[in-house]
Amino acid sequence: MEHYRQLVKNEIQTTHFKSDLEKENVKRNLDVFASFLYADDCLKELINAYRQRPDYENTIFILVGDHRMVPIGNSNPLQKYHVPLVIFSPLVKLPKTMNAVVSHLDITPTINAYLKNNYPYKTDAYCHWLGNSLDTSTAFVSKQQVAFMLNNRDMEDYLHGDYVCSKGRLYKIDNALQCNMVRNDTLLSQMEHELSTMRALFEYTCNHDFLLKEYSRNAACVWRQSIAKSITLHPNDEFGTVCDKFTLEKNVNFLHLVVSMEATCNKNVYPQIVVSLKKDGQQIYYSNIDIQPVAGKGKKIKHFQLKNTYYIGKNTQGAEVNIYLWNHQKVDFTYSHVDVKVITETDDE
């Protein structure tokens, strides 16, 4: 790592910074910027390794950041969500820099449309997208309508076109994504209403519906269990029961899980739901995901619900399924009226 730290120090000496504050920010976060250079070398090794493969000429690489750099502070309400997006492929005939504002939500529908229009690619007749095709404009333009989620799952920043609302303030963005505060109470009120509507839409979509096609004819409910009694997890209790273990009687590829419960917690952080599969004493699948209250916010007793789909592999016959709570936050969590439904499904093909 010292090699990359020295490279950053060399860059500091030759780079023209906008301000002394920006320069000091780099110096204070030397390891962070060293990790950037390390990541660059790793990407170089990855691409060079792929160059040796016969499928390299027909491969599209999509490189994108998944979250902001937490250690590096930024008062700009939009810049903290600004991450790189690079599309690299031997199929690209001419390099192009796109300056339109886009989001992660636009990547999948773009690739889906490209494959559908250029290859014998099988896809559903109708797909649920929250995004649109990537805007490939070389000039700066912002047509986005996006709500941003923080690490604690809150949504308090919202972009609509050239404006951002954040914590009761309104900003107008420029072509460098810098935010300049403006005063327009009517527009601010409208955008806060749009953000509130988006929160309600996302909550309903995630907790009351699947963005999936109907289950195939191969789907079957393999487990249903309810536990009415109250169970308490203390900070020293690492795990909690959700349902009894059960065994898959045949090979399945997908596991659809629906869990609901009533609970109280001494903090605003909660345990995770874990799905674990073991076969012949070996772990063949593991997933952990946060659970969040969907009703009862502000009240002592909250209603929790999780709906999720897991691709668990192929050779799953005879696997033991264990679904439980992981108290990784070490909280006091008392839960009851647990209801669990598990539907399994095999590939259509």
Image (cartoon, rainbow, N blue to C red):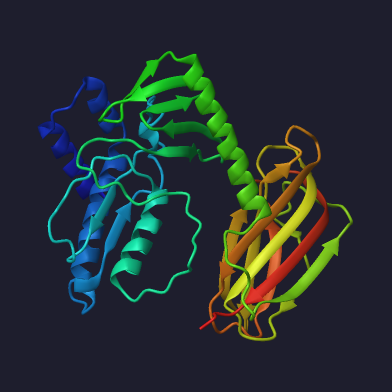
Q: As drawn, which residue projects farthest toward the top?
A: 183
215 w.r.t. 329: above or below? below
Residue in view at x 65 percent, y 41 percent? 269
The image position of residue 183, as x and y in percent, is: 43, 13
Total tally of numbered discs in the picture: 0
Note whether residue 168 is visible.
no
Q: As drawn, which residue projects farthest toward the left?
A: 14
Is residue 170 rendered to the left or right of residue 40? right
The image position of residue 147, as x and y in percent, is: 48, 38
Residue in view at x 70 percent, y 57 percent? 325
Is residue 24 rendered to the left or right of residue 266? left
22 w.r.t. 336: above or below? above
Q: As drawn, which residue projects farthest toward the right?
A: 229
Between 311 and 230, the one nearer to me in the picture: 311
Note whether residue 128 is visible.
yes
Between 301 and 99, the one nearer to me in the picture: 99
Residue 70's quadrant in the figure?
A: top left
Is residue 126 rendered to the left or right of residue 171? right
Residue in view at x 25 percent, y 56 percent? 87
The image position of residue 40, as x and y in percent, is: 23, 53
Residue 160's quadrant in the figure?
A: top left
252 w.r.t. 157: above or below? below
